[in-house]
Image: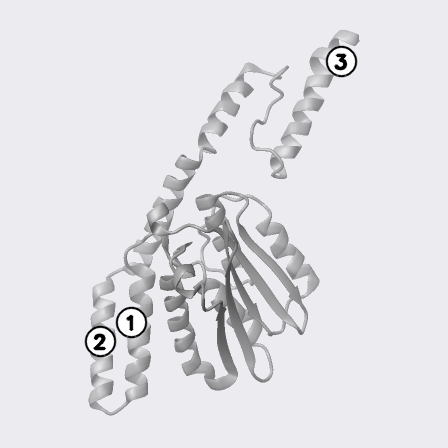
Amino acid sequence: MAVSYWWIVLPYRRTKHIWQLFATGYTFRSIIDEQTPLAKELVAVNTTIQTVLNTDHLMNASKRQAQFLALQNQINPHFLYNTLEGIRSEALLGGLESVATMTEALSTFFRYTISNVENLVTLGQELENTKNYFFIQQFRFGTRIKLTILVDEEDTIDILQYRIPKLALQPIVENSIIHGLECKVGEGHLQIRLERTQSRLIVTVSDDGVGMELPMLEKIQKELNTRSFDYVKHEDKESGIALVNVNNRIKLLFGEQYGLTVTSQKEVGTDVIISLPASKPEEA
């Protein structure tokens, strides 16, 4: 009985405990008890998993997935741009300046979004694309929504040179408008605050929209705290998908210590804090 305990029961319990830790995201080093593995096949499985979890392999696979989905959405970008330019020209000829302006903004947005698939851009580039997106939304909402950007004047030029994943800020602003401000009665305010510490870039997106119910907030927080490699999810109407996608991309690019933090209160609003390393293009 003592022999079976030490050679069967105890290794099984240790392995089961390690599996539970692995399944819940607490460990990624191993899925077996290296002291007394249940079978030699498990050692080979563990070696393979460690190879798969290698950051370089993940980054290459994730980049290929992002490029594939971007190409799916491109179809023929030049056709799209030429069509939008044609609409803009006709609008100008017809004296419809607002239509021409909106068409130009939409063309600029698409050029940034689906051309030159890149991992990183400057904060200034991402912020300009986000402001352009917000400008397009104002054609729909008018004065119902307002955007304020807060940054220390002394830091403005420097902070806009920091690197940020492409399309990391705009999807969060879009999420705030759709799930926060659109459902609100009366005016809604969106604020983007840019800050830096000695080692981090902090971007906070705040809205005074309808906020989230506690179960939804807890669900999103749980997903943000769960390591995932499927960072490019297909379109989903559910709130939080954009946040999870951005969070997972940031963690894949920079590490688990970075990413998103979300707080929200019903009928008060939502804050999304983006934490990134403070690095510039020349430091890459």
Along the line of sight, the residue nearer the viewer: 148 or 17: 148
268 over 159 or under it: above or below: below
Q: Is mark 3 on a helix, strand or loop?
A: helix
Q: What residue type is labelled 3?
A: Tyr
Residue lying furthest bottom = 95
Where residue 107 is drawn, which disc sits there?
1
Using residue 30 as the reference point, say whether residue 65 is left or right of it. left
The answer to which of marks 1 and 2 sits earlier in the sequence is: 2
Q: Give the mark nearer the N terminus: 2 vs 3.
A: 3
Marks 1,2: beta carbons within 8 A: yes
- Coloration mode: one colour
34 in relation to 245, above or below:
above
Q: Residue at x 63, y 39 (%)?
A: 24
Report whether 85 appears left or right of 105: left
Residue closer to the observer: 87 or 192: 192
Q: What residue type is labelled 1?
A: Ser
State the SS at label 1. helix
Give the number of the mark in front: 3 or 1: 1
- Circle 2 residue: 85
221 to the left or right of 172: right
Please provide percent x and percent y for residue 13: 71, 23
Picture disc at residue 5: 3
SS for tag 2? helix
Q: Is residue 67 left or right of residue 78?
A: right
Label 2 neighbour load within 10 Å: few <14, some 14-19, many 20+: some
Query: What is the CA distance from the residue labelled 3 to the residue labelled 1?
Result: 69 Å
The answer for how far apart the CA atoms under marks 1 and 2 are is 8 Å
Dividing the picture into quadrants, the one containing residue 123 is: bottom left
Residue at image coords 73%, 17%:
9
Tell me which amino acid carries mark 2.
Glu
**Quarter placement of the N terminus:** top right
The structure residue drawn at horizontal position 66% and vertical position 33%, both measured from the top left corner, is 20
